[in-house]
Image (tube, helix red, strand yellow):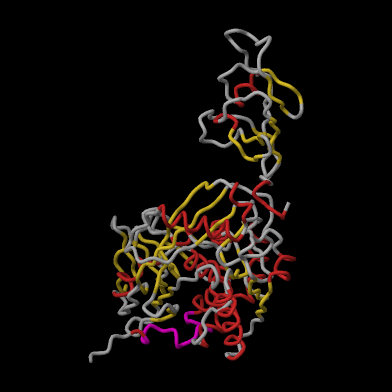
Amino acid sequence: MPFIRLDPPTPEAGPELFFEGRPLRFRPGETVAGALMAAGVTAFRETPVSGAARGPWCLMGACFDCLVSIDGQDNQRACMVAARAGMKVRRQIGARRDAAGAGK
Amino acid sequence: MSVAGELVVIGGGLIGAALAWGAARAGADVTLLDEGDIAFRASRGNFGLVWLQGKGLGHPDYMHWSIRAGRRWPELARILGEESGIDIGWRGGGGLHFCCSAEEMEQRRALIARTRAEAADISIELLDREALRERAPGIGPQVLGASLSDLDGEVSPLFALRAFHEGLVRHGGRLRTNFSAREIRRDPHRGFAIRDASGAEVTGRRIVIAAGLGADALARQIGLEPRLMPERGQIVVTDRVAPFLHHPASAIRQSREGTVLLGSTHEDAGFSTATEVEAIARLCRIGTRLFPALRSARLVRAWAALRIMTPDGLPIYDESPEMPGAFLVTCHSGVTLASLHALDLGPALARGDLGPAPRSMRSARLAVHPT
């Protein structure tokens, strides 16, 4: 089920972030999770163990199901990070790699 | 209510569960009593290493017993995996002990020499920084080398425990939870009767006390005095990181799922299982010194658990002299020794003896002699 912005329906101008390389407009003050959900994104990540798709659940930093990679930093909770213009957001596919050092 | 059985094991942690599984697999009628979540639960809090480097130096029986356990672990992991379908996260092939100073390298060199001198059936080599980097490319600049044995391993203690519990039931045994054993007495017809705090009773022809820190009060009732003491260990765990550590190691362990465990501390904190910020910070510093990329990992959780220590740190395998058929098994290496407990000692207890457990590990060695 898609999420719909109530007020105003869709920003027609303003800052953009990049999700998987595509520009995505958001309203200042929104979280990354809010911006992605409003844009119709449901699969934020794939789990490290089974590879199943996951998306936001608690939206308050507790469930860790909305993990994305932001500007090269893996495993960031999209619901706890304010969207900023130009930030590069990618799906978190599997376990984080940035903390694995030369084992990459 | 009374349930009669052949063998009753008091304590559903890794020691009791391994013994019960082994006995049931050998054909005995087994009841395993688990106290519940009010117990200290060392099996649920431990680090999960099968660690043999340096184990038992100066105590030949303990050393050979431990190494034998290490050699049997692949077999146990295979059997548990095949019969339960649970991936217990076993990884063998030898473990790394990292050294960050010349002094530490020298200590490992001495340990290797002593291991050879005591004719331990384990081979340990010292890797210099370059050799180590081939096995662990992400090490930090302060890491000078590591010792590597052919025998250490690691396992998920939680999955192993579950595999034992499920396997016990599959072999016809009973797992009885929330049974907090308080009183043991001889039963003229059925061997022993064990009563719990609520008055429920279980009887069995033979009993084994494997109740962790709860064993003291029970062992006294069969005339044994293990005088166990808690030793706290704190552990931290990170979020899931892509695989970078391909060996078990003594202070850092990457689980099959990717989480990184750092630990563990050794503290006398009585029966407290509290964590301390200073200890957590120290563990994180050790982890990031070994693998600097871990600075970006997230600390997800920290916890403490209590090791079960005998006065001399060695296991106790004993049978009550005054009540034959009542046994006591305790040690702080419930993971490392699980293979022998499951494959050798459990079947022996099913027959009614301590099998291959060295006689030097009876509790008489700890007797307090009047001066």
* Depth check, front residue: A24 or B314: A24
Q: Position of residue B11 (x, y in %)?
A: 42, 64
Is residue B358 a member of the stretch shown in magenta? yes
Q: Position of residue B246 (x, y in %)?
A: 69, 61
Q: Residue furthest right?
A: A21
Residue B283 visible in this rendered orientation of the protein? yes
Q: Position of residue B60 (x, y in %)?
A: 52, 88
Which residue appears at 57% of the width and 21% of the height? A30
**Magenta residues?**
B352-365
Q: Report which quarter residue B308 is drawn in.
A: bottom left
- Give left or right: position of A65 versus B280: right
Q: Position of residue B13 (x, y in %)?
A: 46, 62
Does A12 appear above or below B75? above
Which residue appears at 67% of the width and 26% of the height? A42
Is residue B67 a member of the stretch shown in magenta? no
- Give left or right: position of B307 versus B1: right
Q: Quadrant of the C terminus of chain B?
A: bottom left
Does B124 appear above or below B295? below
